[in-house]
Amino acid sequence: MYEQPALQPHRQPAISKPEGTISIDGEALISGRDEADKKLSNPVKVDERTLAKGKKLFNIFCSVCHGPEAKGNGPIASKYVQPPDLAMDFYKQRSDGHIYGTIRFGSVVMPPYGEAMSSEEIWEVVNYLRSLQGK
């Protein structure tokens, strides 16, 4: 049964998107963190409402590892690889697109959250993180 003449998705190469493809929500079509770093700029303005939403989402998805102030000291941080202190200058210098891409696609040890949050919600988290960084 395994070798039936049917589509074998685990054996087929990924089909690239046709030139000029546009996403249904207007979000740029990106395939990973490096591409997000180069192509994306933050479309969500910073105001009290978006910062409050970003804080709520950060507390739900991020603070368990990164801690409430993004210092890498969340309640489960000691059980896994130490999460980075996102208030460090190294992370302050990263572009908003890079941070967005990391949240959406994940990294070596961080899981992706692109299926759990909308693009707008991820940008709200980026804005909130920037407020924690003093930017």
Image: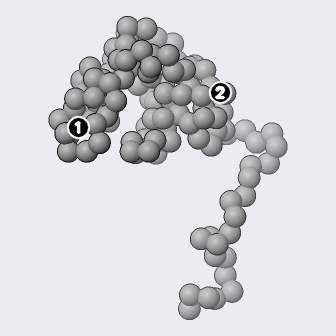
> Is 127 placed left or right of 78 in the picture?
right
**How is this picture coloured?**
one colour
Alpha carbon distance from label 1 to label 2: 30 Å
Q: Secondary structure at mark 2?
A: helix
Residues packed near mark 2 inside 10 Å, few (<14), some (14 to 19) or many (20 plus): few
Q: Residue at x 68, y 69 (%)?
A: 12
Q: Secondary structure at mark 1?
A: helix
- Checking the image for residue 68, the label placed there is none
Residue of label 1: 77
* Image x and y of residue 51, in percent: 38, 15
Q: Is residue 103 visible?
A: yes
Quarter holding the C terminus? top left
Quarter holding the N terminus? bottom right
The residue closer to the viewer here, 54 or 132, is 132
What amino acid is labelled 1 in the image?
Ala
Residue of label 2: 38
What amino acid is labelled 2 in the image?
Lys
The single residue placed furthest to the right in the displayed view is 19
Q: Residue at x 80, y 39 (%)?
A: 20
* Image x and y of residue 38, in percent: 65, 27
> Is 78 placed left or right of 8 in the picture?
left
> Is 7 placed left or right of 69 in the picture?
right
